[in-house]
Amino acid sequence: MKHVEIRRHTDNDGDQLTEEGVAAAEQIGRAGLHPPYALFVSTGAARANQMVTILRAAAGQEDVPVRVEPGLRSVVEDRWREASKASGGGDLEAMRTVDPELVDKETVVLGAALRGVFAQLPGEGRALVVGHSPTNEAAVLGLTGRLVPPLGKGEGVLVTENEGRFAVADLD
């Protein structure tokens, strides 16, 4: 079975983690990780890079490189922000009522990128991905068909793959 932990970055100001965001990431590193990881992944945004670097150090795995997977970061982030605002900051279904084309197309693209992360893992491998909301949730929906609630900063879900079947669970 393969495991991918997907987390939303912690508190940020622009594209950098705030002091509180750094402290929260360090706390997650002390209490919320499940190493060892075969792969650390970031969307490439500075705030995601910062957080995954903090978590990698907390796991004691600085020798494992961080890979950037730009496919997990939407190229239409402004459109996501508009859909979120227009839907009252709701979940993907609420955003779908505002911009169905966005949600439908992006879940396919983001889900394929998440499938690519699984493809990079060895047989019983585990990856840690740091990304954004709502695109993390859209990737999960696109891969698994399961709608997960909006992730708060630092929160995450666990996606598993067993013989080609994907499942989603809360992170402990």
Image (spheres, grey):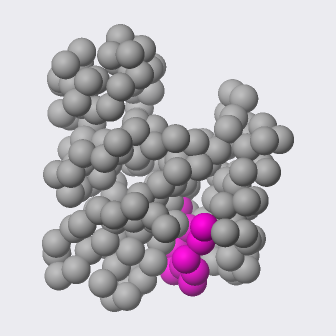
Residue ranking furthest to the top:
86
Residue 103 lies in what quarter of the image? top left
Place of residue 151 in the rendered image (x, y in percent of width and height, measured from the top left):
45, 43
Residue ranking furthest to the bottom:
123
The structure residue drawn at horizontal position 78% and vertical position 41%, both measured from the top left corner, is: 20
- Image height check: is 8 above or below 162? above
Residue 118 lies in what quarter of the image? bottom left
Place of residue 21 in the rendered image (x, y in percent of width and height, measured from the top left):
73, 43
- Image height check: is 81 above or below 57? above
Query: Which portion, as a residue range, is magenta?
Result: 32-41
Q: Horizontally, is 59 left or right of 18 in the view?
A: left
The structure residue drawn at horizontal position 21% and vertical position 51%, both measured from the top left corner, is: 146
Place of residue 104 in the rendered image (x, y in percent of width and height, measured from the top left):
18, 33
The structure residue drawn at horizontal position 37% and vertical position 88%, both measured from the top left corner, is: 124
Secondary structure mostly seen in magenta is loop
> Closest to the observer: 54 or 64?
54
